[in-house]
Image (cartoon, rainbow, N blue to C red):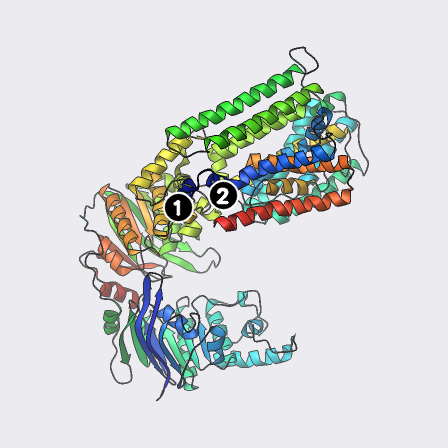
Amino acid sequence: MELSDTSNRDAANGLGGYLLKHLREYGLLLALIAIMAFFQVVTDGTLLKAVNITNLFLQNSYIIIMALGMLVVIVAGHIDLSVGSVMGFVGALAAVMIVEWSLPVGLTIPACLIMGILIGAWHGYWVAYWKIPSFIVTLSGMLVFRGLSLWLLEGQSVGPFPKSFQLLSTGFIPDVFGIGRPNGTALAAGAIAAILIVWLGLKARARNAKYGIEGEPMPFFVIRNAIVAGALLFVCYKLAAFRGLPNVLVSMVVLTVIYAFITENTTLGRRIYALGGNEKAAKLSGIKTERLTFLAFVNMGMLAALAGLIFAARLNTATPKAGFAVELDVIAAVFIGGASMSGGVGKIVGAVVGAFIMGVMNNGMSIMGIGIDYQQVIKGLVLLAAVFFDVYNKSKQG
Amino acid sequence: MSALLEMRAITKTFPGVKALDNVNLTVKEGEIHALVGENGAGKSTLMKVLSGVYPAGSYDGEIHYDGALAQFGGIADSEKRGIIIIHQELALVPLLSIAENIFLGNEQAASGIINWRETFLRTEDLLKKVGLSEAPTTLIDSIGVGKQQLVEIAKALSKDVRLLILDEPTAALSESDSQALLDLMLELKAQGVTSIIISHKLNEVRRVADTVTVIRDGGTVSTMDARTEDITEDRIVRDMVGRDMAHRYPARTRRAGDMLMQVSDWNVWHPEHQDRQMIRDVNLDVRAGEVVGIAGLMGAGRTELAMSVFGRAYGRNISGEVRMHGKPADVSTIDRAIAAGLAYVTEDRKSLGLILEETIQRNITLANLRDVSAHGVINEAEESKVAETYRGAMNIRTPSVFQKVMNLSGGNQQKVVLSKWLFAGPEVLILDEPTRGIDVGAKFEIYNIINDLSAQGKGVIMISSEMPELLGMCDRIYVMNEGALVGELTAEEASQERIMSLIVTE
């Protein structure tokens, strides 16, 4: 009998064995902490200043939002190279609609999201129903929508936007408690979120114990939750000291929670993992693989459109260069977060942490005054290192 | 006539299996020698030993070739000595030309620069020899399998072949292409080429072979000389089959109940080659509690039949009707077929049956997530309970249901696939080679599971290339050949000889 009994071995090795098995998950979190600590030191504490933390979220929100959709696409076994161009195109469309055609913001935003959905459907149609490799379809989309935004903007920057549109990105949630500074809403939200995470974690542990499912050892659970809850409280405290919770942070968190729930707890999510893990087996299990692939791209298009709106709102102008090469940052974030190129593997939380790692590095290196040339080199090497870590880990376990 | 090849007492063991046990094979210079035996009897293994795929030292026994002891370290060694194998799956590159394929790895070149004139001239010469009238620049992709087979032979001739080995050369060929190929073999023989032909088609064997060696269960059973004695197909069949079958199968009580599923006038065409009909006018039925077998050789169309019925997972232009409990059933897509009460357990569990990177639990619930979820949200606790139930019932040997299935042995993987389909709650299970690649103990467990299923009133269709397995397990056996059912035998009537003769007499 050639049974592998890794879990027996783990039991024998106790905590060390458990850590080894879940090295990737903890490693990612530890890497983020280490990188933040590093830049905190070398930037003389600028990184974690209230204003900079706020900036970090504002700067990276559109990457994180697109990483959610990209994770789904990559888990399904595909790739989307067009997101940078689509994001730029939708931003341009919004600018033309609002600034040149004077259409109301309330109409423009849904129209732009629908445009994103249609673009995603266009890509998904070719990939899902004609089996054209997603690399080619979305490479084509990348060129097409870059060209269309140039055409739409006639090569010019279009702006500025009215206040109501800018709020999408630069607005803050008002202080419902009327304290002002520190912002009461931010503090309360941080506290509630921290309590919620710990409570949900404990509930899941209790349920696992009831069904005899082996879970995370208690020390790890305590340490991990302490770090996460502590970080949450710290960030919210810092944000409160500046202007409170940015609107965009709220939408980002809500989206992350929704996508994490869908991918981990629903039949839809399960089927996407199955599709990416083994498309033929999934199909023979009665899963409508074509439709799922199609929907993954539709979803990606919608999120790219949302990212385009947020990006345009932040810059207060739409430029023909908006979103240029952003797809690479998004894809890198997903792979740093532990997704597999061959599909079927990856987590939403991983992709978000991956995006933060990229974001913190961008931000920290800019504060340090490192040139864009070295920044690119370093980011590239970090991507390779993260994926190498995955591959190495796997070969050692296998 | 002197012997060109003598394989003496060849024994080859794989971990846990003795694939060849003291096999002797003597091939005389200038003859056509036929090697016959059931699937898995050891013919291909023997040829791999001969050609050096299994290098000298990895087997016991001696190979004497052309009067001297031969110890081949790899295919290149045996090819250098003029031993060339043409495998069942052709080794041609579809998007290269005939000429490029013939000289692949043996290019007519000087210091790395190909001499195209020489290449084309020699190709034309070789094509004339094998009787193929195609331009050397024609792409392999654009000619049929029969002609591709001829290109393979031309390729062999380009290497100064002395011993040509053809593994099931006519399996995929039409009648006229087969005849052409056999004629070519006789012609090559006249030119002094010695050949070994592996074939299931006894009429072809009788037509070309000078000597016939029968292999069974990894050993030589008999060698017959067509020049001195009369070789009948009956005699070959008797030697090919016939082994002790007692106690390898659990006892089963037969209980055919009401009619469960009927397939009528089922026709299927090849998904890519639209003019190739894969399934021809098939009619079959299964009753509640019945285990029905489908016997046939590889390539007979059994898997194609099963998959086309299971939600058109194979083929195109499918016509025919499926009835469940006497009423027409919608099996036009896989999820509808599952809803209609069908399940198909694939022969290729690794690439079609399992998601290897996922856990046992997630594989088991995949075809029926509805029963472990509410409003699209999965209840993981409920899911674990289901997985644990099947782990116990099917005796899946694993420390936990959170183990990835790629870490399981073949037998346990097969139990996971079976669990998945049982959880989907089918009325009729189609099991395609359910015991392929698993050890004897696990086989017996699978047989017990099949008997339990039929005791619960489910209908089972069992496709297997192992005839003893069908005879030991089935209440009724359909015999399939070249896409059509050529016979139906009850358990009492059925024997390996009768099945074999239904297949080979056409």
Count up the numbered dots: 2
Residue type at the position of mark 1: Asp
Is A332 in front, or is A294? Answer: A332
Is A131 in front, or is A348? Answer: A348
Relative image position of residue A242 (x, y in whole percent): 72, 20
Residue assigned mark 2: A275
Q: As drawn, which residue projects farthest toward the right?
A: A156
Relative image position of residue B255 (x, y in whole percent): 19, 46
The image shows residue A245, relative to residue A40, as above or below, that is above
Q: CA distance from mark 2 to mark 1?
A: 27 Å
Residue B332 visible in the snapshot: no
Q: Secondary structure at mark 2?
A: helix
Residue type at the position of mark 2: Leu
Residue assigned mark 1: A5
- Residue in the picture at 52% in, 68% down: B92
Relative image position of residue A245 (x, y in whole percent): 66, 21
Is A124 in front, or is B110? Answer: B110
Dot placed on the residue nearer the N-terminal end, 2 or 1? 1
Residue B206: which quarter of the image? bottom left
- Residue in the picture at 57% in, 25% down: A229
The image shows residue A193, relative to residue B45, as above or below, that is above
Q: Secondary structure at mark 1?
A: loop
Q: Residue under mark 1: which chain is it in?
A: A
Judged left or right of residue B396, residue A116 is: right
Q: Residue under mark 2: which chain is it in?
A: A
Judged left or right of residue B168, residue A324 is: right
Q: As drawn, which residue projects farthest toward the top?
A: A178
Residue A106: which quarter of the image? top right
Residue B222 visible in the snapshot: yes
